[in-house]
Image: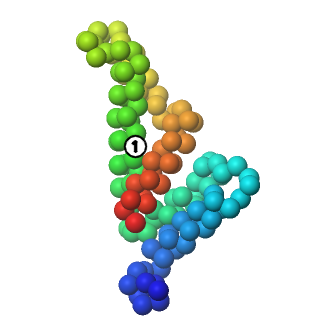
Amino acid sequence: MLYAFRLIDSKFYSALNVNRKLRNIAAHTSEPFEIEHIKEQLEAIIDFEENFTIIIDKLARENLYKMKEIQMRDTVKLAEGIDEMKESIIQEKLKTLWNDPYVNDQLVIWKLGYGLTFI
């Protein structure tokens, strides 16, 4: 109805349709629903405004990076103090963070979450 009355444009309408189709696939299929198979469709959901994909990507990357850094610091129990060796290990791991396929799969989920929040 919003599209019929021209209250939303075709890009936003398309993003909503992609979201609806993915939701139906996830809810009504007996096959495993894996993010890696639908990355292009997820990108289409957040591509409803000029440069919006760039903004969402940056927001998701920054916050995922912060969360991973906090997790690493908690893992090595740095709450009582940071020694230089532990800090250098953390910094090295953070440099290679985006080469980890698991982290990249998480990034897709984060981007979807932020995109849907803004929709």
Tell me: residue 69, above or below residue 3: above
* 3 to the left or right of 20: left
Residue nearer the viewer, 116 or 96: 116
Whole-percent x, y for residue 4 in the image: 47, 89
Dividing the picture into quadrants, the one containing residue 80 is: top left
Residue nearer the viewer, 7 or 100: 7
> Could you tell me how many numbered marks the image carries?
1
Local secondary structure at mark 1: helix
Tell me if I can see residue 54 in this picture: no
Whole-percent x, y for residue 55 in the image: 35, 55
Tell me: residue 44, above or below residue 76: below
Query: How busy is the neighbourhood of tag 1: few (under 14 within 10 Å), some, or many (20 plus)?
Result: many
What residue is at 40 percent from the left and 43 percent from the top? Answer: 61
Dividing the picture into quadrants, the one containing residue 38 is: bottom right
What residue is at 42 percent from the left and 90 percent from the top? Answer: 5
Whole-percent x, y for residue 24 in the image: 62, 65
Residue matched to label 1: 61
Whole-percent x, y for residue 102 in the image: 56, 35
Dividing the picture into quadrants, the one containing residue 29 is: bottom right
Residue nearer the viewer, 118 or 95: 118
Tell me if I can see residue 89 in this picture: yes
